[in-house]
Amino acid sequence: MTDRTRFEQLLDEIDRTPWGPAEQALTAEAVALAQELGDEQLEYQARMRQTASANMGGLTDVMLNSFAWCLAHHDADPQRFPLDIDNGAADLMWQFKWMAATLRASPAFSSEQIAAVLDDMEEHYRRAGIGLSGVLTARFEDAWASGRLDEAERLRARLETTPRDDYSHCDACGRSQAAGFFAVTDRDERAIGLVEEMLDGGFSCGEEPEHALSRVLLPYLRSGRLDDARAAHLRSYRLAKDNPDNLGIIANNIVFAAVTGNEARALSLVERHLPWLAHDPLNVDGHFAVLSAIALALDRVAAVGHGDAAVRGADAPALEPFFGSRDGEWTASDLASAAFAAAERIGAQFDARDGSDWHARRLAGMRTLAAQRWDVPVRSDAFAVEAPSSDPQDADGWYDRAVALASYGSERDALAAAARVGDLPDAARRARLLGLRIGAHASLEDWTEAEALLPARGQALRDAGWHEQADLEARRGLALYGRADVGDHAGLEQEWADSAGLPAWSRGDIALTLAALRLRGDDPAGAAELTEHAAVCFAEAGEPRLVVASSMLRAMACTALGEIGQAHDLLESLLDDDDLNPGQRARLLEVRARLHGGAGRLEQGAADADAAVGILTQLGATAALADVQILAGALWEDAGVPDRAVPRYRAGIRLIDGRGADPSGAQFRLGRAMLAAGHAAEAAELLADVLQREEQSGASAASRAMTATVLARALALAEEYGQAMGAYGYAAGLHAEADEPAERALVLTEQAKILARFGENSDARDLLEQAAELVRHTDAVGAIVEVLHNLGQAYGGDRDERAFALFDEVAALAVEHEADWLIADVTDSRGRALVEFDRIDEAVAALLTAADGFADAGDAASAGGSELFAARTLTDAGRLDDAVALYRSVLDRAAGMPAMRQVAALELGDVLEKLGRTGDAAEVRALLDE
């Protein structure tokens, strides 16, 4: 491949690659290659693209240098270096619009320099014969940014009467800019009107609608439109959160979170976007906006009692120019003060350059805003609820806690508690504590630490008079603590065979260790037998804690054997024991929760998991708590109570994150639960983050496809249909990569539903036909039914006879699998399709059959829906008398459904009126007032 061929290939890749780091790298490579070739015309092609790329990515220094190079070459030879290279934003006069704003954003550039750029821009526009809309826009932005608001208003008014041209702001950007100006000049209704006009028209651009939405957050709040403000925030932030050039948008969203009672979310946004401060050193006005927002947000965090919360990432060296150096983490209170100081310093530099007090006024407005609050809950973040401290007050208390934590199986927590015990004068307790520590290290497979404690353990055993146990441990060492090296298992088996002369406690120790090894080695029957021996031995030795441990292991062995009922009975019996230590009770509750879950007793299992969480919280078992919180969340989610699942998942995620582990799996669950709880926009934000991390970590295509599918569902429910289509398309590709045809077919079906929603019936049908071809080669009955049923409905809507064969196929599968509700549903679909063919009698018969089927399946709403459609069909066919009877039947069915009852009463009244039965019509319409 020649260098010129490679260059052309690079340009093609650049033009096909979305804005971002990958595209920036390609652009830089193209510039460098053109320079190597010594061809300035090729370099011009690359640099024109680079200017646009750098503008979109917030690489201001690159943008300024690239633009200056291109402008100089164009001025020197306009023929060789034309204004427009026919490549989108790679138009020199369009790029000129960015220059004054870019210089304005840094106090390093003087007002004279900015004015010179604006004059130069106007001269170039006039020389090129271009209208002055773009120049007026740039002058308006300059006046506004420096606080010359009266001048800005005059320029804005001129813009409204200036003819638009190819260099005017697009429909989205123009409305967004004007809305922002109206918002800062106290014209909230006009700001909101422009943005809603923009949204209704479907106008979008590089950073729109996210910028416009962020600009009307405060106007929405001030106007009392809190739900609209919340929706705008969630959409704006989701669209803006991945581009470091969006500092202003992020600042507006941080402010929203801070003043709406979402202080935990505000802190989370601050932590996430702090690194962006160091992204573009020339976007100083963006720094000012974000620093002001950070100061406000962290002041609010402190005001609600979390001023000592650590702000993760604030101590990064790259942020020292803003906050200064610091030993240790920044707290919210301290960083708020540092952010305000940095904003004041930057603002003073701008105001000194501009000869105004505009930045000082902006900062004063932010301080005033800190005292205001609107209640707009966003459920994606919350501060952890701290459990009351119950730390033991003496060595005995710490000893008991260590034993409880070890009994549960929280090894790290047990070791931490054991370290607080100190010296124990009683040899027996000292031996037990050393055994606990060795066992914890062994469970963590930290064999070196475990072995180092064996001599002290042996001496403590002898000091306590337990010489036989000391001799046993001297012979078998860490084999008695679960090590499975060569010879360990066999040695223990021999000890058990020769154990008749050993004390009961030692015999129980051998039996319990062997039982655990057998269970691990897939011999649950052998394990169960040994646990019974261990329990007898420990009972003889007067060790009730170890009797319980033996019984717990037997319950696990029973579970492995499939003897679930016996395992459950055993757990019930153990939980009736009032002498259990807290750790044992928590473990038993957790195991029973899992058994309940496996048996479908989901709410009982969730209650047990919650009880275990409460105990572990009191024990300070932070290392173990995350898994049980996630278990509780999963059980509540599966029980169909997602509102209870969400806070439990959140609590688990905080703990997972706190120990430096990957929270993606738990966050996926949280996003799914939030979606089920009706928080679609928040779920979409979270799931997009999960998908991004999965992509970065190289997760399997199947895993990413699952995340992308749930993300797409969340986007669709949030009415972000364009993004939903994209996410479904991405998921379909991943399912193809993972060789999952049924799953891919279902995703295509979801895409088809969105297309059909917007009247794109032909494209929807094409997708469904692809899906049907994919799914027919699988044995995924559920997917086959879903796809064929939807394709049948699409054919029916198009008066395509193929619909009925598909309905027959779905009905046959429903009968085969005794799916009564599905039989009713496909019968309803058949009836609606028959209406399209004007086969009215058959249609009504099918719809009424479907209604009866739905009713028998316990779905009164669907039954009423089928019957209502049948009544409407008869009405449309002019068979009003027949329709009356059906409408009255719907009224009977809808006794507990006010909305359906009102619709039926309204329509029946109209039918009776047409029949001349005005008295009956009035009587029916009276139902509307009930």
Image (cartoon, rainbow, N blue to C red):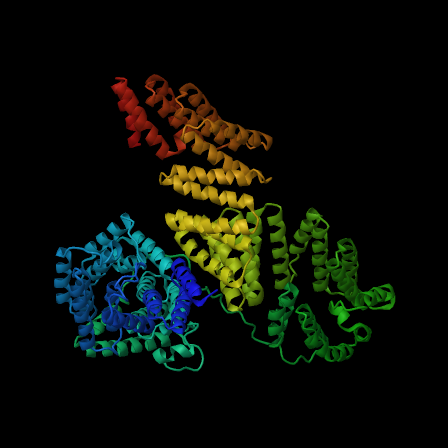
Q: Is residue 9 above or below residue 754?
A: below
**In-image side of 151 versus 920 (left or right):** left
Q: Residue at x 54, y 59 (%)?
A: 699
| x then y, percent, for residue 29 | 42, 69
Quadrant showing the C terminus: top left
Residue 624, quarter of the rendered image? bottom right
**In-image side of 709 versus 413 (left or right):** left
Q: Residue at x 39, y 39 (%)?
A: 756
Front residue (pair 77, 176) = 77
Front residue (pair 589, 150) = 150
Q: Is residue 487 above or below residue 572?
A: below
| x then y, percent, for residue 393 | 56, 75
Front residue (pair 833, 370) = 833
Front residue (pair 259, 749) = 749
| x then y, percent, for residue 616 | 57, 63
**In-image side of 234 versus 122 (left or right):** right
Q: Residue at x 30, y 22 (%)?
A: 911
| x then y, percent, for residue 751 | 44, 44
Asked whether residue 664 is in view, the answer is yes
Q: Residue at x 37, y 24 (%)?
A: 873
Asked whether residue 285 is in view, the answer is no
Q: Count how many numbered circles sit on residues in the image.
A: 0
**In-image side of 632 versus 897 (left or right):** right
Residue 261, quarter of the rendered image? bottom left
Residue 608, quarter of the rendered image? bottom right
